[in-house]
Amino acid sequence: MIKRTAVSRIEELSKHFPVIMVCGARQTGKTTLLKEFARKNGKINYVTLDYPVLKQLAKSDPELFLQQYETPLIIDEIQYAPELLPFIKINVDRKNTSGQYFLTGSQMFHAMKNVSESLAGRVAVISLYSLSYSEISGKDSKAFLPEEVPFSEQKRTISEVFGQIYRGGMPKLSADKEISSEDYFGSYMQTYLERDIRDLINIRDEERFLRFISCVAARTAQEVNLSDISKDIGIDSKTADSWLSVLVSSGIVFLLSPFSANTVKRIVKRPKLYFMDTGLACYLSLWNNPRALELSAMSGAMFETYVVSEIIKSYANAGVDVRSRLCYYRDNNSKEIDLLIVQNGKIFPIEIKKSANPGRESLKNFNVIHGLSNFEVGKGCILCMAASTLPLDSMNSLIPIDAI
């Protein structure tokens, strides 16, 4: 079994909170994570709302449902019966002890919204994505920050990196090397449509929604342009916006906000979208082998998607809310910085390049953030395929992507 970084977070949070909520896309390992925690920490009862009879009981008589199970209790797929949440609140207030309920939800922000409203102050929320490279390779990791990265070497070749990009980080694919990506993601998408999508929105034309998500996958690492997407699919912009919200809600897509500075008129305001599992993005955009992807015009976007998703996972696994820390910069003069990390009163600029030796010219846009806000500019970097960490000047370095 691959050790998940989030296990230690659950162990720590369960000492302080009566309810732990693990949110994430389908098949990212939420249930396995909690069962592993239970194995290490003694007997914890388990029930899943995947079973129609149990789901119906939980919805129709939530108090009776909870009476059947002793705490500590894992309740899988809590989004199917939000009626349980007020009664969980009553129970945790009555017992007033930590580590009583462990919940999972496949519809991230939908489930989090219901939980946060019903269990305010009583719940700790953990976002779980597919496996990071650190988890797959068994390395310890922490939230990535350029000024805290020690000397590092690039262990993988570009072909090996694109092999990982093509395969993605879904636990099943990492554990079972024999199953093909195409077979796995074909089944995954069918389950996703039948279970998550039909719960969130009423989609009559599943084929059109599949075209929509494939269209979005082809635009990973780009700014969101709902007008272009809606024209390609033959839907209106309002529907495109609604469907994109579903992809975000179910943990498939992450929207990276633009840097915000009200005093600067030229800054672009649209978010950039990133698929959180590159294997799924490759499947949906019809790549059938990593070598073809590596040589394609889309290779840079997929490489950027992989690096950004790895950084997001490093923050999520450390229990840090990435939405308040990560953004990007682009202005109307086409000056862009791929990623900005905002932390401790500083802005850390990051460029992402597939090259092994991108050179100093890749730093040319870093100077635009000076004077944009009250933040101090911290050390920046170019995340790339460089053989090892190499300083470019007193403030910026080349850093291999294996350092994330």
Image: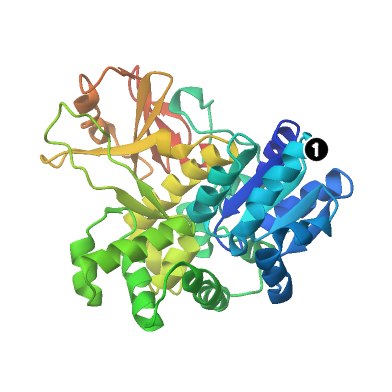
In the image, residue 330 above or below residue 1: above
On the image, the x and y values in percent for residue 388 come to 48, 34
Q: Label 1: how many residues lie within 10 Å, few (<14), some (14-19) or many (20+)? A: few
Viewer-side residue, 17 vs 94: 94
Q: Secondary structure at mark 1?
A: helix
On the image, the x and y values in percent for residue 50 come to 68, 70
Viewer-side residue, 147 vs 159: 147
- Identify which amino acid the numbered label 1 is placed on: Lys
In the image, residue 311 above or below residue 180: above
Residue at figure coordinates x 41%, y 34% from the top left: 324
The N terminus lies in which quarter of the figure?
Answer: bottom right
Total numbered circles:
1
Residue at figure coordinates x 33%, y 55% from the top left: 301
Q: Is residue 38 left or right of residue 277?
A: right
In the image, residue 358 above or below residue 160: above
Viewer-side residue, 336 vs 21: 21
Q: Look at the image and name its color scheme.
A: rainbow
On the image, the x and y values in percent for residue 365 come to 21, 32
On the image, the x and y values in percent for residue 189 come to 50, 74
Instruction: Inspect this view and state whether residue 10 appears.
Output: yes
Instruction: Inspect this view and state whether residue 337 appears.
Output: no
Task: Name the quadrant containing residue 374.
Answer: top left
Q: Is residue 94 left or right of residue 4?
A: right
Q: Is residue 108 left or right of residue 364?
A: right
Task: Name the quadrant containing residue 246.
Answer: bottom left
Residue at figure coordinates x 46%, y 59% from the top left: 252
Which residue ends up furthest to the right in the rendered image? 42
Q: Which residue is mark 1?
A: 95
Task: Name the quadrant containing residue 64.
Answer: bottom right
In the image, residue 82 above or below residue 379: below
Viewer-side residue, 176 vs 48: 48
